[in-house]
């Protein structure tokens, strides 16, 4: 799904007022503060960041305030499965008798942490692969790009399903598998950057002054493709969370008694004809909002890194 | 043009061999390795000796490259994708039953997507930053955030349970023509798949047209008095078509991936359900066979996109040679 990125990465209206502010002050403001300024200027992005922080707090701190039993099923305790919301269970209980609100927190811990870790893997692998391919060029580039073509021609979901059937479904493997299958699109984008930057004057003059290839990658290519790396990383996290949830829905996600949002939605969907709405909608709403918020943060980050908006 | 097609064909073949190398190597990483089918055939109580004998008989102990050469020979010369020991049937037999069903689903939603998303994207680019544009962009954003299965669940809820007018599932018979004999059941799956694709394609179309609209030739066309419609469809649309064709070629695997999920939601037994079932029951030959087949379809899609692009835009043919 990373190839979707090109459509997400649309040019937005520049935040001209900000640039004017910086100019008027007449003081040289450090670049990172200018970037922060542009980012903070974007109200929607601020709201998204706030929402994401609240969600993380809800998932990781929430269980310490709202105590629920998420390990033993109800059978041993009392018959309370599929209960509608009440004061006792604020969002009702699911088909196994777990408290739904507590379940959302518990599933969120897995969805968010797995998504972030897998996203980090995709961006690290994608960056290294793309940099090497784009910067060294020639035969190396051709070979690496044909391998990438091969990987991209296998539908990502099929590849994930295949890998999960061949390996196992443990938490660590899920992170690794989503990580090693998610970087193909990222590598393409980073390669384009490396290809472009190595031809620019500052890289050329560094070469002329005798800088080694690794020095140019480390000192010039990498910092200058940072904007794309950070943006792509954000979208990668969203994609990883989406893929994890899809696997969960197909019954290939985190094995019980652990859970994630995708698995929860699948359990809820089974109860759908019975009209047990509380088993789907709260989870679905939170899930969609988290993904949309991450996407907005990514868009805002790209604007903030857009060098043309920054005055030196 | 001929050399261009030939070169792209050679490239695709190379890529296909890499794909086969990947799928062929995967079972080596499994716990039981390439001997996993032996446990299926001989049962869980098989002695190590009988397992070894089975491996010997089926050439499992040949060197890797010899086995890979045998695999290439099997696929390209005998058109045999392998044998599913779990379902006791050839993989090709399983695939040929289910492929048409998934293809119908994917192709009909792709056609619907093209019909809706392209005019929508053009319209959005033309009326950019208006209320319509914002509404369409906002919807596209939300549709990104909704995973395919969740959209399916919501569609089911609204049109099958809350407002029960549409069947929740397509007919379960295996006839490939079911879409025409009983179209009502296909409405929800096709619309769900289409909505997801529209979110993606219309956004792409919008940016492609926007990029074209700032070009000098558009200004010239306007200056010489072309009507707005003529500028849009005669000049902007044709030039924005290139990226769209590429994206459609690249999008095909994504569409099939989406079809996997849609099939599970609406309980429509096609390739998707087959691959998920095969994966959960560790039926590796079926998984690899389906993956290989879909990769080949994707490569053909990409190839066709590139050839069409080469016809539409002569620059590509020439530039391609330096790539």
Image (cartoon, coloured by chain):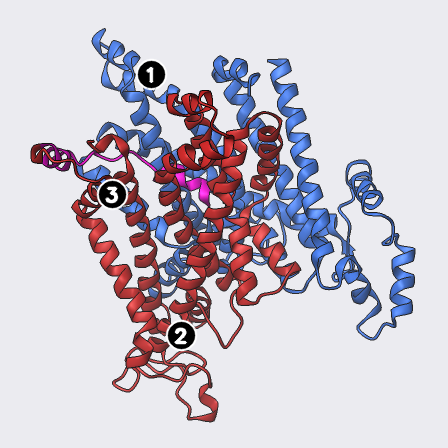
Chain colours: A red, B blue
Q: CA distance from mark 1 to mark 2?
A: 54 Å
Q: Are marks 1 and 2 on the same chain?
A: no
The residue tagged 3 is: A32
Q: CA distance from mark 3 to mark 2?
A: 53 Å
Answer yes or no: is residue B295 visible.
Answer: yes
Q: Badge 1: few (under 14), some or many (20 or more) residues near its Cα, within 10 Å?
A: some
Q: Position of residue A272 (x, y in %)?
A: 41, 70
Residue farthest toward the front in the current orientation of the protein = A210
Q: For residue A244: magenta?
A: no
Residue farthest toward the top in the current orientation of the protein = B224
The residue tagged 2 is: A274
The residue tagged 1 is: B235
Q: Secondary structure at mark 1?
A: helix
Q: Name the subunit of mark 2.
A: A
Q: Name the subunit of mark 1.
A: B
Q: Are marks 3 and 1 on the same chain?
A: no
Q: CA distance from mark 3 to mark 1?
A: 42 Å
In the rendered structure, the answer to whether residue B134 lies left or right of residue B314 reads left
């Amino acid at each position: 799904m990373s190839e979707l990125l090109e459509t997400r990465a649309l040019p937005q209206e520049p935040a001209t007022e900000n640039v004017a502010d910086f100019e008027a002050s007449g003081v040289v403001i450090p670049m990172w503060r200018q970037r922060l300024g542009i980012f903070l200027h974007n109200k929607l992005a601020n709201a998204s960041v706030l929402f994401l922080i609240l969600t993380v707090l809800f998932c990781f701190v929430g269980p310490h305030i709202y105590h629920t039993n998420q390990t033993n099923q109800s059978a041993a305790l009392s018959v309370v499965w599929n209960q509608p919301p009440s004061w006792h269970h604020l969002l009702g209980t699911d088909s196994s008798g777990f408290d739904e609100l507590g379940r959302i927190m518990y599933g969120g811990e897995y969805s968010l942490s797995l998504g972030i870790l897998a996203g980090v893997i995709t961006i690290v692998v994608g960056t290294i692969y793309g940099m090497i391919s784009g910067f060294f060029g020639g035969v190396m580039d051709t070979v690496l790009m044909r391998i990438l073509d091969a990987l991209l021609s296998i539908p990502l979901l099929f590849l994930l399903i295949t890998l999960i059937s061949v390996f196992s479904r443990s938490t660590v493997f899920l992170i690794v598998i989503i990580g090693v299958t998610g970087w193909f699109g990222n590598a393409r984008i980073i390669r384009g950057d490396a290809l472009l930057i190595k031809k620019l004057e500052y890289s050329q003059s560094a070469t002329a002054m005798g800088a080694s290839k690794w020095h140019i990658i480390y000192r010039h290519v990498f910092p200058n493709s940072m904007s794309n790396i950070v943006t792509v990383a954000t979208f990668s996290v969203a994609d990883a969370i989406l893929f994890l949830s899809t696997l969960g829905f197909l019954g290939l996600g985190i094995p019980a008694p652990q859970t994630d949002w995708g698995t929860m939605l699948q359990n809820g969907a089974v109860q759908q004809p019975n009209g047990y709405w509380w088993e789907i909608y709260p989870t679905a709403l939170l899930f969609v909002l988290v993904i949309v918020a991450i996407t907005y943060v990514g868009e805002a980050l790209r604007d903030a890194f857009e060098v043309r908006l920054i005055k030196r | 043009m001929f050399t261009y097609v030939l070169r792209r064909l050679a490239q695709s073949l190379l890529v296909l061999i890499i794909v086969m190398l990947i799928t062929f190597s995967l079972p080596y990483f499994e716990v039981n390795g390439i001997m996993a089918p032996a446990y299926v055939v001989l049962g869980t109580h098989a002695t190590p000796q009988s397992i070894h004998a089975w491996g010997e008989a089926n050439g499992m102990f040949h060197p890797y490259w010899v086995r890979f050469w045998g695999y290439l020979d099997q696929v390209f010369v005998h058109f045999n994708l392998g044998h599913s020991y779990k379902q006791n049937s050839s993989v090709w037999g399983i695939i040929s039953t289910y492929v048409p069903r998934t293809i119908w689903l994917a192709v009909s939603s792709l056609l619907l997507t093209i019909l809706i998303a392209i005019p929508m994207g053009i319209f959005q680019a033309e009326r950019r930053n208006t209320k319509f544009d914002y509404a369409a962009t906002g919807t596209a954003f939300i549709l990104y955030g909704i995973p395919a299965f969740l959209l399916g669940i919501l569609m089911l809820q609204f049109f099958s349970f809350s407002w029960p007018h549409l069947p929740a599932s397509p007919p379960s018979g295996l006839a490939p023509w079911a879409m025409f004999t009983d179209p009502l059941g296909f409405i929800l799956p096709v619309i769900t798949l289409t909505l997801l694709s529209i979110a993606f394609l219309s956004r792409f179309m919008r940016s492609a047209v926007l990029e074209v609209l700032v070009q000098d030739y558009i200004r010239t066309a306007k200056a010489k008095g072309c009507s707005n419609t003529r500028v849009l469809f005669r000049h902007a649309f044709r030039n924005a078509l290139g990226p769209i064709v590429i994206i459609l070629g690249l999008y095909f695997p994504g569409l099939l991936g989406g079809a996997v999920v849609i099939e599970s939601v609406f309980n429509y037994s096609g390739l998707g359900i087959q691959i998920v079932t095969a994966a959960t029951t560790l039926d590796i030959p079926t998984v690899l066979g389906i993956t290989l087949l879909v990769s080949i379809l994707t490569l053909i899609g990409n190839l066709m996109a590139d050839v069409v692009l080469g016809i539409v835009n002569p620059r590509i043919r020439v530039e391609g040679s330096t790539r």
